[in-house]
Image (spheres, rainbow, N blue to C red):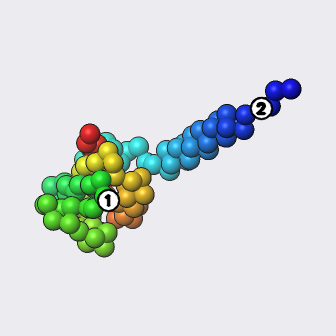
Amino acid sequence: MHRRKRKELAQSSDIAFLLIIFFLLLAGLDVSKALSYRQAKPAGETVETSPLSLTLEDDDTLRYQNQPISLFQCKELLDEAGQLILTVDDHATWQGVVDILSIAEETHTKVVLHATT
């Protein structure tokens, strides 16, 4: 009598669970945020400023001009910026990236992601 290994079943269910989460995250992303384009500005509105560059390091430290900043400071900076260039270390957590993308969505900031290896 052969017994089925539960380990094989657990591995495939783990993969299925991760794929479901991946597709849910993708469904929530707005693709146009990754594209760089210009929209006509209403009369009296100021010209868009240059993109804000932030770096998310492997320990989820967020840096602006080589200085560590908090998520609250990030939100203040994004309130003034029209576009964010976010460089993400390949060892940074997904939660750190999601936190910054949430702030960008809140402040209606376009995001361009770069990954470092």
Q: Which quarter of the image is occupied by the N terminus?
A: top right
Label 2 SS: loop
| Residue 88 picture location, percent across and down | 29, 49
Q: What amino acid type should be assigned to the residue bearing mark 1?
A: Asp
| Residue 90 picture location, percent across and down | 32, 45
Q: Does residue 76 sit above or below 53 in this rendering?
A: below
Q: Does residue 33 sit above or below 80 in this rendering?
A: above
Label 1 vs 2, first from the N-terminus: 2
Q: Which mark is residue 60?
A: 1
Q: Are marks 1 and 2 in contact (CB under 8 Å)?
A: no
- C-alpha span from label 1 to label 2: 41 Å
| Residue 52 picture location, percent across and down | 19, 57
Can residue 80 be seen by looking at this rendering? no
The residue positioned 26% from the left and 55% from the top of the image is 57
Left or right of 97, for residue 26: right
The residue positioned 63% from the left and 38% from the top of the image is 11
Can residue 114 be seen by looking at this rendering? yes
Q: Nearer the viewer, residue 112 or 45?
A: 112
* Disc 1 versus disc 2: nearer the observer: 2
| Residue 108 picture location, percent across and down | 35, 60
Label 1 SS: loop
Q: Does residue 45 sit above or below 89 in this rendering?
A: below
Q: What amino acid type should be assigned to the residue bearing mark 2?
A: Arg
Q: Which mark is residue 4?
A: 2
The residue positioned 37% from the left and 45% from the top of the image is 32
Q: Which mark is residue 102?
A: none
Q: Nearer the viewer, residue 52 or 37?
A: 52
